[in-house]
Amino acid sequence: MLLFLAGPIAYCVWISFTDMQLTGSDRTNFVGFDNFRRAFGDEKFRNAVWLTLVFTFLSSLVGQNTLGLALAGLMRRASRPVRTVTGAVVIAAWVLPEIVAAFLLYAFFRREGTLNAVLDFLRLPDQNWLFTLPILAVSFANVWRGTAFSMLVYSAALAEIPQEINEAAEVDGARGWRRLVHVTLPLIRRSIATNLMLNTLQTLSVFGLIWAMTRGGPGDRSTTLPVFMYDQAFTKSLIGYGTAVALLLLLVGALFSAVYLRLVRDEV
Amino acid sequence: MRRGTRQRLAANAALLALAAAFALPLLWLLLASVDSAATLRVRAPDSPTGDNFSAVWTEEITFTPMRNSLLLCGGATLITVACAALAAYPLSRLRSRLTRPYLLTVLFSTSLPITAIMVPVYGLFVRINLVDTMYGTALFLAASQLPFAIWLMKNFMDGVPVVLEEAAWTDGASAFQSLVRVVLPLMGPGLTVVTVYCFVMMWGNFFVPFMLLLSPDQLPASVSVFSFFGNYGTVVYGQLAAFSILYSTPVILLYVLIARRLGGGFALGAAVKG
């Protein structure tokens, strides 16, 4: 583990300070902070950062987290067969290999795909989703694929709430939203925090899904940081620059990971 | 009571609507795979056929990539599980000052984005001539899965009481012997879960082999299905769907296997929660 994880990370730090390239000159020079300065001055890099934020916010915070909680909550009320069917479908979307999921959703969002068929049926205007709103399409794809995890975490969390507390709240007249906000959510706040952290971390590193659906395009309107990194390092052969971007991504990840660690520390 | 019934109906309706939304893309996959003129839209095939399956049932399209996947993921899983067992044993049994920091480090690296280190790993692999080799890729896959495997393994191992080992120790067994002869057999279900989980994660991994393997005859199914719909000009969607199903079947079966054994996916959720 040290060799294969810490090694590359150390190597990564070193390369990010060089101008290493795959083609052209064999010599690799030390260039100091140039790569980082360049990144922050690069319009495309800032665009990628922005899109990563949008992607993470939409798919992880809003989508997976809220939908996962909603599913878990509804499942506690629903009857057994419905619960089984929904659980199976949602989990199937999660278990499918990443690339198959990407392909399925590619078909779903294409101009001649299923989503537009449904919209036509409902007499709503259709769209060329992958062209007009690519970031929205890939975010939905990520929600489709990742919600099962939140659902499982929240189901477990909700099952742990003692029945007496719910009954007491009922007696005190807390219903619907008020009970959710004042009783349920505070009780599972640790699960919420943990789940948000893990979702965010997972979403930060999504590559295959986006790459297979849009290749970061059209233009660079769905180029999140991992896609940008790949593009710089391999299409443009700028390994040094790509690595600098990777390092920044890793730092963000490490930051979230550290927060996550603080959250679960007492339980180790 | 009436309010309860109404609530249940509302919850059922909402869940079914959500399930339908989740199911649509899946439905397309199933229908397209038996439709000889499949399009991108969900539609019932005119006459269901197995043509798509027999079209992709060839050495080049199905068998080679699947065999590669199996070698790659199977090898990597073996390495991961063996290393994880060896690492988890002292973590679970010994009370040392290092245990806690080590566990926290493991947990920390579990959540780092692997995607981010792929570019430098590629650079490193070029330097040490491991690019485009199966064992190099398998090693890296194993390494990337290891932190989580150790974590999971340790949690399962904690469930095996130390008392059972003490008998072995009095008979003069070493730590390694008691691990292999006593602990591992006793944590059978846990071991299965770790193994299957690692395998499933690697089977679906696209990015690592996509970056580290180049020659077509070494590509695992995750990458070959991608080039299938990326490069071949006109795409025969039906065949692609059929292949996707073949490729996904093993992991779904394995998942069902462990889900049954542990009463739902909740064990994994709980394990991740810490």
Image (spheres, rainbow, N blue to C red):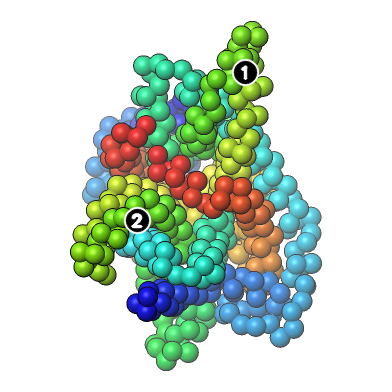
Residue A63 seen in the current view: no
Circles 1 and 2: CB atoms closer than 8 Å: no
Report x, y in % for residue A124: 39, 88
Instruction: Give coordinates of residue A73: x percent, y percent.
Output: 37, 63
Which residue is painted at 29% across and 40% down in the image? A263
Which residue, given by chain and number where applicable, does mark 2 sit on?
A: A163
Chain of the residue where label 1 is placed in the rendered structure: B
Query: Which quarter of the picture shows residue B61?
Result: bottom right
Counting from the top left corner in percent of width and height, residue B146 is at 51, 34
**Label 1: element kind:** helix
Residue located at (54% from left, 65% from top): A84
* Left-right relation of A60 to B238: left
**Residue A118, image x, y percentages:** 48, 84
Same-chain check, marks 1 and 2:
no
A34 vs B218, nearest the viewer:
B218
Q: Chain of mark 2?
A: A
Quarter of the image containing the C terminus of chain B? top left
Query: Which residue position holds label 1?
Result: B178
Amino acid type of the residue that numbered disc 2 sits on in the rendered structure: Gln
Distance of label 1 from label 2 (alpha carbons): 43 Å
Instruction: Please name the amino acid that badge 1 sits on.
Output: Ser
Residue at figure coordinates x 31%, y 33% from the top left: A266
- Local crowd size for mark 1, using a 10 Å CA cut-off: few (<14), some (14–19), many (≥20): some
Quarter of the view holding residue A261: top left
Going 60% across and 36% down the picture, which residue do you hit? B191
Viewport quadrant of the N terminus of chain B: bottom left
Residue, far bottom: A123
